[in-house]
Image (cartoon, helix red, strand yellow):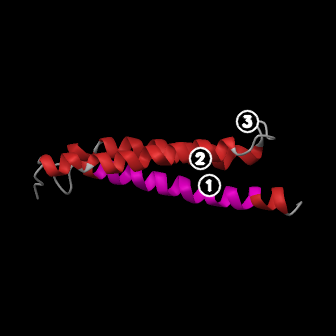
Amino acid sequence: MNLENDEISNRCILPFLGFAIVHLISAFLYWWAWPDRSWRDIIMIPEYLNHIEAGLYIWSSTWYPRIDTLGGYYTLAVHKIEMTAALVALVATFGWYVSDCISFHDI
């Protein structure tokens, strides 16, 4: 099934790209919120994963205008990139739980 790559779908990239950039800024702010930790500290791993996730979403949002068919190369690539970003977010969630236990519960 062909999808029309018209002017409206090309304008739809801006909100997705904007949200991805806001996500990257948010990831930087989460990283910056740990001023007393070294960048090599194990507690910073979820923050680095958050940066990777934001970068993957920026990458996938730039491919939205290239999508031409439902089963096409770019459609499947966008799905794979966003699935990878979701899995990175899931791993980061467990990391945030562990960092919360280390920081606030003295394990």
Residue found at x 48% / y 57%: 86
Query: Quick check: 101 left or right of 76?
Result: right
Q: CA distance from mark 2 to mark 1?
A: 6 Å
Q: Secondary structure at mark 3?
A: loop
Residue found at x 74% / y 44%: 34
Q: Secondary structure at mark 1?
A: helix
Residue found at x 11% / y 48%: 6
Q: Position of residue 16 (x, y in %)?
A: 34, 50
Question: Camera-side residue: 36 or 98?
Answer: 36
* Residue type for callout 3: Trp
Q: Position of residue 3 (x, y in %)?
A: 12, 54
Q: From the image, tell me which residue sits under label 3.
A: 39
Q: From the image, tell me which residue sits under label 2.
A: 49
Tell me the tag on residue 92.
1
Looking at the image, can residue 67 be seen? no
Mark 3–mark 1 contact, CB under 8 Å?
no
Camera-nearest label, 3 or 2: 3
Camera-nearest label, 3 or 1: 3
Q: Does the stretch in magenta take in 85?
A: yes
Looking at the image, can residue 50 be seen? yes
- Tag 1 or tag 3, which sits nearer the N-term? 3
Q: Which span is picked out in magenta?
A: 76-99
Q: CA distance from mark 3 to mark 1?
A: 16 Å
Q: CA distance from mark 3 to mark 2?
A: 13 Å
Mark 2–mark 1 contact, CB under 8 Å?
yes
